[in-house]
Image (cartoon, coloured by chain):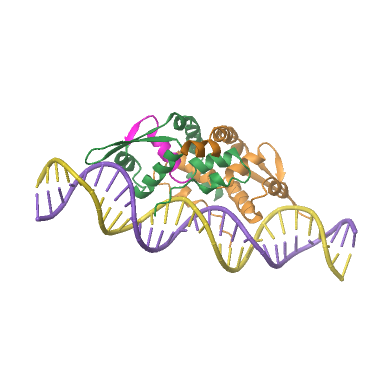
Chain colours: A green, B orange, C yellow, D purple
Amino acid sequence: MVTTNLNPRFIDNPLNCPVTRAMSIIGGKWKPIILNCIGDRTLRFGKLNQIIPSISNKVLANELKELEIFGLIKRKEYTEMPPRVEYALTSSGKTLLPILHELASWGNTHTAKKIIKERA
Amino acid sequence: MVTTNLNPRFIDNPLNCPVTRAMSIIGGKWKPIILNCIGDRTLRFGKLNQIIPSISNKVLANELKELEIFGLIKRKEYTEMPPRVEYALTSSGKTLLPILHELASWGNTHTAKKIIKERA
DNA sequence: ATTTGTGGTTACCATTAGGTTACTTGTTTT
DNA sequence: AAAACAAGTAACCTAATGGTAACCACAAAT
């Protein structure tokens, strides 16, 4: 069974906290990466899978579905054979890009080497 | 056994992606909330637990420990009885605050009501 | 003598997120 | 006749995350 419901953390947000809300949407291992990868482009499923090879197609399909439910990406299906499906960010999804970029540049200042060295 | 190691996602970052790196540090259910709560203040353990009542003290202790390992918060212990421990953001942790604020205001525009309504 | 306050720890358990492999569809190429 | 392509599904499994409840040390207050 494919379970693509709303993230329980989104529904049951004890503090009704906007940070929790945001994290319940873009949190998780792959969602921010996917959003960041798509960026301003329009990408097909297979292309995304190729850019992010370490994600399985099951998980990719699932994450895309959830992102669509939250209105961050739009899915366009062409009825051809073999099938073609294109993904792009919605305007709402694009408002996340600058935040993700900041997060990325922040992440660059916290490299693994640095932290592991500092702990040693 | 208390398992406060580095997040496996931080170590095993397949794409060596800064977004992944950032999310492996501040991702998770409580870390961004804790950071945001502390903000510019200095808070004691009990006070934090009171502000975020839905977190258990075990989990809170654990998250604080991890945030300390990543150099985002500093812990100051007073050898008194009963004990007193104060937490505050490090300068590195404070650089996250503006990003968290943006995330929060973004989260405010994506309320549960709105999304559930749009789906109906 | 017992309770209270503080900042945790321990052992145990439940849920969830994520991963693996195999399979489907219908048309085109070998 | 069989294999390849594209975009997934289905069934199953493991690891990580988070949660619960009980307990600890030590001093001060009741």
Magenta-highlighted residues: A28-43
Q: How many marks?
A: 0
Residue A84's place in the image compared with D30, above or below, is: above
Tell whether A97 sits left or right of A53. Answer: right
| Figure quadrant of residue B88 | top right
Residue B80: percent from the left, percent from the top? 79, 53
Residue C10: percent from the left, percent from the top? 62, 65
| Figure quadrant of residue C20 | bottom left
At 59% from the left edge and 45% from the top edge, which residue is drawn?
A: A13
At 34% from the left edge and 32% from the top edge, which residue is drawn?
A: A42
Q: Is residue A120 magenta?
A: no
The N terminus of chain B - image quarter: bottom right
Residue A113: percent from the left, percent from the top? 48, 45
Q: Is residue B80 visible?
A: no
Tell whether A37 sits left or right of A95. Answer: left
Which is nearer the eye, C12 or A6? A6
Q: Is residue A32 magenta?
A: yes
Residue C15: percent from the left, percent from the top? 52, 57
Which is nearer the eye, A27 or B19? A27
Which is nearer the eye, A99 or B17? A99
Q: Is residue A53 visible?
A: yes
| Figure quadrant of residue A11 | top right
